[in-house]
Image: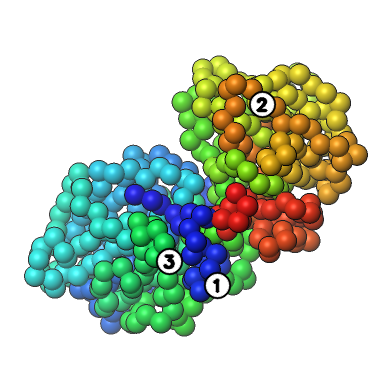
Amino acid sequence: MPLILPGNVASATASTTFSVANSCMFNDGDTAYMHKTFDAGGTETAWTISMWVKRGALGADQRIFSCDDSSDGDPDNYWRFNSDDTLRVQIYNGSSIGFLSTNRVFRDCSAWYHVCVIWNSADGTEEDRLQLWVNGTRETSFSSTTYPSQNAVTVTSSQVVAIGRRNYAGEQYFDGYLAEVVFLDGVTASPVGTLGEFDEDSPTIWKPIDVSGLTFGTNGFYLDFEDSANLGNDANGGTDFTEVNLAATDQMTDSPTNNFPTNNPLYGQMESAYHPASEEGNLQNTSGTTQWKNSISTIGVTAGKWFMEAKIISVTPGEGDAGDYELVGVTDAFHPNNWGGTSFNNYTGFGALQIGYYHTGTYYKDGSGSSYGDSFTAGDIIGVALNVDDLEIKFYKNGTVQNSGTAIALPTSASSTGLWLFMQSSYNSVISMNYGSPAIAITSGNADADGYGNFEYAVPSGFYALCTKNLAEYG
């Protein structure tokens, strides 16, 4: 099942297509969430919760929607990702009156999922009283099910609703991105045509539609995350959510209608010792002190001219293994697909089909270093201009092109796949990657020529932020 609206779908760039402007990034390390208390008088036999989700961390219980009694956890209504990356929905009111747990796992951190839960206990068909839909298709394969009795009541009125964690006990924090969060009180309907639609050019692709005109009911709400100063704003006009450990920098332009890369958390999982601690929506990597930690972008390119920035957040200087080391660059997909075992204890530029700009000012290719540009350290921002059309690359330090603007030729060989990914390596340091939807504060603000991306320094002429809107034009 396709997960996102791809950039090469014709309607992706059409002026008549509904576009989602923003999402909200939840970093579980910050214990970020938002909450409010529902009013009394809601409809407790019928409601719908809908949202678009892009995952960050995997392998942990993470609640996305939770409605419970904050004192004892009863009632407890929620949907979450389980630690095995399946989906679970539970309706609990003294006992489990509704329960669904999928067989299917959801581990794609590069894509947006649309998840919709429908509660309609008045329905005459038992299986229709609790429904789970993903990307416009109803889930039917479950490892465990409990369907409610007819007209069963789930207590939501006057309860605390939390987005991003289990409110009772303060646990199971979500890690990733949310967009278009909708709760319809007293309204149940198939999401098709109400909360999304299949693309007319590619009818298996599910995409968002404008939900602002829906009937939301007493406790209904709509979070569009378009106000960075008030991310908990209810665009439907109801009581706003209270934000906890969320900041203006958590408003992102990465959305279901314009998907940006993140660092791929699955790369290196088979050798977890070499996988960095990934935070801030898989955009910030923290390395250890005993070996290299590497990451690659979730989106690769075979054509076009692409720009990104990497900010060195912090380093721990010293001697030997206590020292800091950073490289930023690119890799052909041949290496991530073929490295194994201790080969992960290497760096960007170690492979024959890689180039990495090292913090001393040297660039590395095939494990050999060549003099190139200025050194860099904490606080510096390294720009990477990848020109796949002409098979060359340039690096920038704080907006200044290095090596007098002379490009480095991208390597090729019989093993070349032609698919290039951005890559970074770190050792005793923290690096934040900005592909155009940054997790860090940008003081200047520079977009590409088409208006996409948010960078600290000017995007080189002819280069673009790597996102699905630009891929539709230049990829």
Task: State yes or no: discs 3 and 2 in contact (Cβ < 8 Å).
Answer: no
Q: Nearer the viewer, residue 432 or 6?
A: 6
210 vs 313, left or right, is left
Which amino acid does the dot numbered 3 rest on? Answer: Pro
Which amino acid does the dot numbered 2 rest on? Answer: Thr
Q: Identify the residue at image location x=28%, y=51%.
A: 88
Which amino acid does the dot numbered 1 rest on? Answer: Ser
Q: Residues within 10 Å of mark 2 (few under 14, many from 20)?
A: some
Disc 3 to disc 1, C-alpha distance = 15 Å
* Marks 3, 2: nearer the viewer: 2
122 vs 281, left or right, is left
Name the spot of residue 231 as percent of width and height, x first: 55, 68
Q: Say which mark, if any, is on residue 208.
A: 3
Residue at image mark 1: 15
Label 2 sits on a secondary structure element that is: loop
Residue at image mark 2: 412
* Marks 3, 1: nearer the viewer: 1
Task: State yes or no: discs 3 and 1 in contact (Cβ < 8 Å).
Answer: no
Specify which label sits upstream in the sequence, 3 or 2.
Answer: 3
Name the spot of residue 176 as percent of width and height, x first: 49, 51
Q: In the rendered view, tell whether residue 177 sits above or below residue 429.
A: below
